[in-house]
Amino acid sequence: MTVSEAPHLRAAVPPNEVAAEEGWAPPVWVPTRALGRTVLLTGLLLVLGVALGRVDLVLLAAPFAIGAAVGLRRMPRSAPELRIDADEDHIVEGGEVEASVTVTNPDVINYDLVVVRTRTSPWLRLEDADRPFAISVTPDGWTAVELPGTAVRWGRHAVGPAAARVAACGGLLACRPVVVPARGVRVYPETEPFAATEAMPAAAGLVGNHRSRRPGEGGELAGVRPFAPGDRLRRIDWRVSLRTRDLHVASTLSDRDAEVLLLLDVLGEAGASGGVKGKASVLDTTVRAAAAIAEHYLQRGDRVSLAEYGSTARRLRPATGRRQYLTVLEWLLDVRADTTDREPHEHVFGAHNVSSDALVVVLTPLVDPRAADMLAGLVQTGRYTVAVDTLPEGAAPPQRSEWTPLATRLWRMERENVLGRLREHGVPVVTWAGAGSLDLVLRDVARLASAPRGR
Amino acid sequence: MLNGIAGRIDRTRTAVARATLLPLLVRAGIGLAFLAAMLVAWPATLVVSRYVVLLAVAAVYPAFAPRGRGVTLTVLAVVGGWIVDTTWYDARIALWRLLVIATMLYAGHSLAALAAVLPYDALVNPDVISSWLVRAGVVILGSAVLTVVALGLTAELAGGAFVLATLVGLAAAVGVTLLLARLLRRP
């Protein structure tokens, strides 16, 4: 009989790699120049005092020797610990942010001086965050530096990295700087109120909030018509049937839900962002408008999806409800201007990727010719498309020579030309102005949708 | 050249605009402590002459560069002045002068150690400075008591120096220095 060897098993969980996680060598306590000075002066004064037979020189050395002995009676053993805390709540731009940097002393000696420095994102106005803080920490204790402030723009903003340098033993020993990586604070865009009263041009499913223009199962009464094979018995309108001596059924309009695709043009950023109370740049308008439109349609029970028009081509799948609204807000935080020269993936925005019934709202500054081409392409494939112009008022390139104003005027004329041609192709272009911005064009698009399709 | 000067002026202006009170006070303390030590240590005839400007510059320099070697050189200059005054000018070793010099030298050294790690634009918790000063004060008090006792003893035991005592004293001096240096290497 042979005894089979037990199979070699290994742990399914990865091993604990603490050292790799830290990423830097553990900090070391190093002597400062003050300690070198102490040793040098003590030695020199003592030797001189003895050599010259002078007690006074020995007494001059006494404070240095006593100071060093008192300071170094206990040596630090471990490194200070540093932690950044930042708000996890839902912060909206313009709202208050609470951040703090905590220094913990796990050692048996007092940290005489801890200098804490922090870097923060320019869009977080934290009180005195650009200054170093000097604090002391007792043994086995901690001290926190509070950094209250406001968030002035949407996005993911960093609090940190923070660094702490500790001096102990009366300034005779110092610790190499301890650095902790930055912590992100999510600041959600402030949505401008938006409401569109017009019906959706087309709907995909058979249930939803929008009264469709097609007869079907629903709640809205469309009329009474003679009974036809296939009609459900409970739809028979008995009063009309008795009066006319013929079977009649009440027909209703079907309730539909709609898909809204918000296409964000991130090919370029223009205008300087002034934060929540200042001027809005292209991306500011894009993100705030997208959040407002998404909020509006999601509240009505429609499915909303988002996509970026740029080389990264991020997409958010269509879904509905409050959960999707939060996902949309989270997704919008990562909107960045596309600075690479790579071409946007055309196939991503091809006709097969956009549902034929979807309402496509393109938020674009119409600065890049590729965006206009994309818009024209969408309309040509029969999508219900609305363009929202996000270029800020008075956006102009920086003044480089005396010809710049002229070039800017030429560029503006060319852009007007593009807008006109787009309108000719049936792309309504509206400037974003908050509530009711899209009402007029949505009515036009809805009218377009009721007409027979195809060309 | 001009750009360099303009840049330096700009940096200085920014530094002055950003500086906070407590680090400035610490640096002022360094300057005052070393100035007092310098004026007390050097011979009175030099102190009242125009050379006092040189002494003042040497005393105040560490306040501007507390991280450099200037602090050590200033302390050595004070000690040099004291040795010159008591040997060349044959001044009496007065207890008050010795106490003032020892106190001011240690205060200047301790404040320079603080200023070396304290950025000029830091927001300082006052506890940091007060506990630092208390610690320095305890050391100064201890050594002042030692000074008074030791000077009293030497006045009573005054006698001619002999070679064996000098050798023992030298060994003790080297021993104390090595002990201080070894304090660091403790586990």
Image: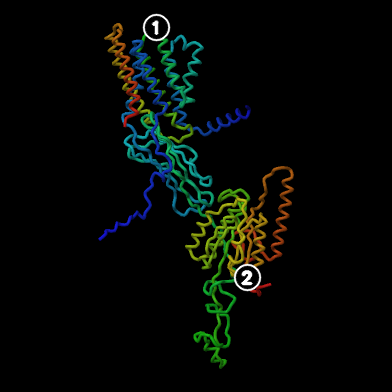
The subunit letter for the residue under badge 1 reads B
* Total marks placed: 2
Q: CA distance from mark 2 to mark 1?
A: 109 Å
Which quadrant holds the N terminus of chain A? bottom left
x, y percent for residue A144: 40, 42
Quick one: SS at disc 2? Answer: helix
Which quadrant holds the C terminus of chain A? bottom right
Label 2–label 1 contact, CB within 8 A = no
- Taking B84 as reference, is A55 left or right? left
The residue closer to the viewer here, B66 or B14, is B66
x, y percent for residue A279: 60, 50
Quick one: SS at disc 1? Answer: loop
- Residue extending farthest to the left is A1
Label 1 amino acid?
Asp
Residue A162 versus residue A440 in the image, above or below = above
Residue for badge 2? A446
Q: Quadrant of residue A420?
A: bottom right
Residue for badge 1? B90
The residue closer to the viewer here, A275 or A56, is A56
Label 2 amino acid?
Ala
Q: Residue at x 61, y 57 (%)?
A: A344
- Residue extending farthest to the front is A1
x, y percent for residue B86: 39, 9
Q: Residue at x 34, y 19 (%)?
A: A62
